[in-house]
Image (cartoon, grey):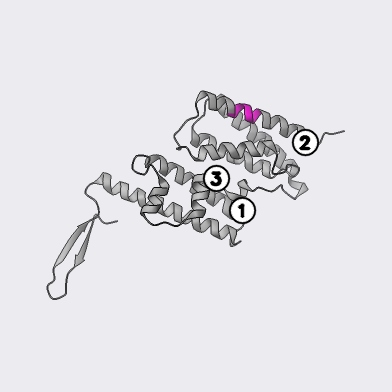
């Protein structure tokens, strides 16, 4: 991107005016970040519409959405002083992106996780259960190691919720899923560098342990 723009005058006069887009490097970086934020929001809106219209399937949608959410959270952290209110930023630049607002600012997780349905293939149940147990252990161990930053916890909880959605006998009202969606919603409203305080960390550990116990109790008992 150029630092200035030369606007040619009339062909007869050959006059030109130089319009500066920024005055220094810091200002240039700010506008480039604004452009990145604009692009992420617009791309998320298009991705949501493509998924709703069945242009792309869940396997294509989910990783792309997770990537956009991660990029949004990281950029939001770096712009917290210049863009304290993302919705005001959108109004300023006349962005009509309700689906992106819902995904990035309200829900904070892909639609496939938000409305996850149990896996219909019984053949994948054993694998899904094993993956879920591993994700539970990883999340709980991370908390014990004081990994309490949003950008550390968010992907772990997303992976856990995704694996729970692939376990055939768990319905959408399974308490572990409900709690995870609530936590992901809270984390989505925080900056990537924010950290849970001691009370929040203890509550998350309690919720994970309770969900793990309920999950294990839900599994068919061998005779």
| Residue 63, position as x, y percentages in the image | 56, 49
Residue under the point 63% across and 30% down:
207
Q: State which quadrant residue 157 falls in.
A: top right
At numbered mark 1, what does the secondary structure look like: helix, strand or loop? helix
Q: Which residue is mark 2?
A: 219
Sequence order check, earlier mark of 1 and 3: 1
Left or right placement of residue 9 versus residue 108 in this view: left
What is the chief secondary structure element of the magenta stretch? Answer: helix
Nearest the camera: 176 or 132? 176
Which residue of the protein is positioned furthest toward the right in this rendering?
223
Residue 207 painted magenta? yes
Give the magenta range.
204-209
The tag on residue 59 is: 1
Q: Is residue 98 depicted above or below 134 in this figure?
A: below
The answer to whether mark 1 and mark 3 are in CB contact below 8 A is no
Q: Sort mark 2 into few (<14), some (14-19) or many (20+) by Cα contacts within 10 Å.
A: few
Q: Is residue 159 depicted above or below 65 in this figure?
A: above
Which residue of the protein is positioned furthest toward the bottom in this rendering?
12
Sequence order check, earlier mark of 2 and 3: 3
Q: Which residue is mark 3?
A: 107
Residue 74 painted magenta? no
One can see residue 108 in this view = no
At numbered mark 3, what does the secondary structure look like: helix, strand or loop? helix
Q: Is residue 32 depicted above or below 54 in this figure?
A: above
| Residue 105, position as x, y percentages in the image | 49, 45
Residue under the point 31% across and 47% down:
29
Nearest the camera: 96 or 45? 96
The quadrant of the rendering that contains the C terminus is top right
One can see residue 7 in this view = yes
């Amino acid at each position: 991107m150029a630092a200035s723009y030369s606007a040619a005058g009339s062909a007869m006069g050959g006059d030109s005016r130089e319009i500066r887009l920024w005055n220094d490097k810091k200002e240039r970086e700010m506008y480039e970040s604004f452009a990145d934020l604009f692009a992420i929001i617009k791309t998320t809106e298009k991705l949501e519409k493509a998924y709703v219209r069945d242009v792309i399937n869940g396997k294509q949608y989910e990783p792309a959405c997770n990537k956009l959410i991660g990029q949004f959270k990281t950029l939001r952290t770096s712009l917290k002083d210049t863009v304290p209110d993302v919705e005001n930023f959108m109004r300023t630049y006349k962005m009509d992106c309700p689906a992106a607002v819902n995904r990035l600012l309200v829900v904070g997780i892909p639609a496939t996780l938000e409305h996850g349905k149990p896996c219909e293939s019984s053949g994948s149940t054993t694998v899904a259960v094993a993956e879920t147990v591993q994700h539970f252990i990883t999340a709980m161990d991370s908390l014990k190691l004081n990994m309490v930053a949003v950008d550390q916890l968010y992907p772990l909880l997303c992976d856990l919720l995704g694996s729970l959605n692939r376990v055939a006998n768990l319905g959408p009202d399974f308490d572990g899923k409900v709690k995870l969606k609530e936590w992901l919603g809270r984390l989505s409203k925080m900056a990537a560098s924010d950290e849970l305080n001691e009370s929040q960390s203890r509550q998350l550990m309690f919720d994970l342990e309770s969900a793990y116990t309920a999950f294990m109790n839900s599994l068919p008992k061998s005779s």
